[in-house]
């Protein structure tokens, strides 16, 4: 019988504690503004766990998912993480989407020496010994996307539109400096932030359109997150703004987000990820088939799902190698783990807790899928960007230096202020 522990069933969880089982915490928002993106990741984890149990479990034991709902409430992520580690005594956590939710969890898992796999692209500028970052760092998504705009589309004026929290603000700070270094004048860089769930995009999109009145080619770099994307793309369509007029490249819009939109007016706009459902490989074909058999034939796949696929399989391999789910032993076994990704290459876990990943640019099609128009070989993830002065001197090397924030000038290891 398949078991699933929910946060509302603490008594039931405790009653099963005597059985031989390994517990995996699933920390994704199932309600609130981020449910549009995170519910699919909950389902992905349930599928991966079901598959592993069907193959014999792990270390001879059944894997039991423990699902909690932090409800798109950032402080609640910390409470739910503590509950997973202290009440449910999970062996590992897979979860979070936004960087503010990850940073909410960080002090808890460092205090309690938990282990979390974080599956979404993010702003970098972090390397915790208790987190493995299976999504993209800026050099694996944001920087290549800007290069595409500069080199392939001739964009001269950039509108950096983001949701108002740490990921868009830090990413755009990196991109602003990158653009200045590339010769884009400061006056040609327009930055705007909106709250989570923002819905009235009329004035902002009108401002972006006005940027091109001088005749320069305008492009939008979008770090808009969650259901705010619905209003943004609907406003583009309402003003008849095509990709030829003002191309948009999004970092947080994939197949799942597009599945709720009329994409006929969005054809030609772009997204930068490390995976698209349209990748033509045997591994991806098998993954899609398994996913649709599990979740429904109309369900799409997306990049953070592949990140969970890679992270979960690496964790399984590390547990098998270590012969235990004990966090310190598993962490030591994680370095150098390799998993075949879904786009035809190999994901490798690096000493800085990031992956080597390919960079893909996809063009939105009328059916809500992406035509892959650019793909690189695997790019090693960089925890600390080279484009901010204070970060350029930092490196992360956990097995070698025992440090995620090593200053190469002072030859000292420092800690992020928010970390334990």
Image (cartoon, rainbow, N blue to C red):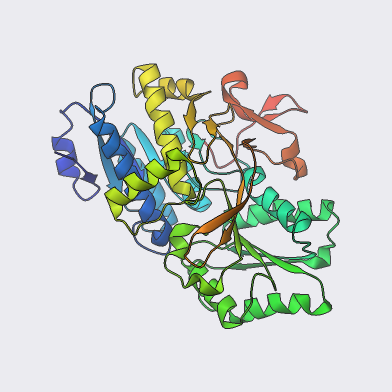
In front here: 161 or 255?
Answer: 255
In front here: 289 or 108?
Answer: 289
Judge whether 324 appears above or below 261 on screen: above
In the rendered image, residue 366, in percent from the top left (x then y), is placed at 51, 68
In front here: 294 or 404?
Answer: 294
In front here: 195 or 183?
Answer: 183
Is residue 334 visible to us here? yes
In the rendered image, residue 58, in percent from the top left (x then y), is placed at 29, 26
In the rendered image, residue 419, in percent from the top left (x then y), is placed at 53, 38
In the rendered image, residue 148, in percent from the top left (x then y), is placed at 71, 54
Tally the marks: 0
Judge whether 263 appears above or below 281 on screen: below
Residue at the image position 21 percent from the left and 43 percent from the top: 4
**Residue 286 is drawn in which quadrant?**
top left
Residue at the image position 33 percent from the left and 31 percent from the top: 91
Left or right: residue 245 versus residue 73 is right
Residue at the image position 64 percent from the left and 57 percent from the top: 169
Looking at the rendered image, the quarter that the N terminus falls into is: top left
């Amino acid at each position: 019988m398949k078991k699933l522990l929910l946060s509302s069933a603490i008594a039931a969880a405790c009653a099963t504690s005597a059985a031989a089982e390994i517990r995996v915490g699933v920390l994704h928002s199932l309600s609130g503004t981020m449910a549009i993106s995170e519910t699919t990741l909950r389902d992905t984890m349930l599928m991966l766990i079901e598959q592993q149990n069907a193959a014999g479990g792990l270390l001879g034991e059944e894997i039991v998912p423990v699902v909690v709902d932090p409800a798109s409430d950032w402080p609640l992520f910390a409470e739910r993480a503590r509950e997973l580690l202290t009440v449910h005594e999970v062996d590992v956590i897979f979860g979070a989407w936004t960087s503010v939710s990850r940073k909410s969890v960080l002090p808890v898992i460092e205090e309690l020496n938990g282990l979390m796999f974080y599956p979404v692209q993010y702003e970098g500028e972090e390397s915790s010994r208790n987190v493995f970052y299976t999504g993209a760092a800026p050099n694996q998504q944001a920087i290549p996307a800007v290069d595409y705009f500069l080199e392939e589309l001739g964009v001269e004026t950039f509108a950096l539109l983001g949701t108002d929290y740490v990921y868009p603000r830090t990413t755009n700070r990196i991109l602003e400096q990158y653009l200045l270094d590339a010769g884009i004048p400061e006056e040609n860089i327009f930055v705007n932030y909106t709250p989570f769930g923002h819905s009235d995009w009329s004035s902002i999109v009108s401002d972006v359109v006005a940027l091109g009145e001088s005749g320069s080619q305008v492009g939008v770099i979008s770090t808009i997150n969650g259901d705010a994307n619905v209003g943004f793309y609907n406003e583009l369509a309402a003003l008849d703004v095509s990709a030829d007029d003002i191309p948009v490249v999004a970092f947080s819009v994939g197949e799942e987000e597009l599945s709720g939109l009329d994409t006929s007016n969005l054809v030609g706009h772009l997204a930068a990820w490390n995976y698209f459902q349209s990748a033509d490989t045997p591994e991806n074909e098998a993954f899609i088939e398994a996913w649709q058999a599990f979740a429904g034939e109309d369900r799409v796949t997306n990049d953070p799902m592949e990140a969970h696929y890679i992270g979960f399989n690496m964790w399984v391999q590390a547990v098998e190698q270590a012969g235990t789910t004990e966090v310190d032993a598993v962490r030591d076994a994680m370095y150098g783990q390799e998993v075949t990704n879904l786009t035809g290459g190999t994901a490798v876990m690096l000493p800085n807790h990031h992956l080597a990943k390919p960079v893909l640019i996809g063009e939105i099609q009328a059916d809500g899928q992406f035509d892959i128009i650019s793909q690189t070989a695997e790019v090693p993830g960089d925890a600390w960007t080279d484009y901010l002065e204070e970060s350029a001197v930092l490196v992360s090397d956990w097995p070698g230096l025992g440090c995620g924030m090593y200053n190469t000038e002072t030859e000292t290891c420092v800690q992020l202020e928010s970390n334990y």
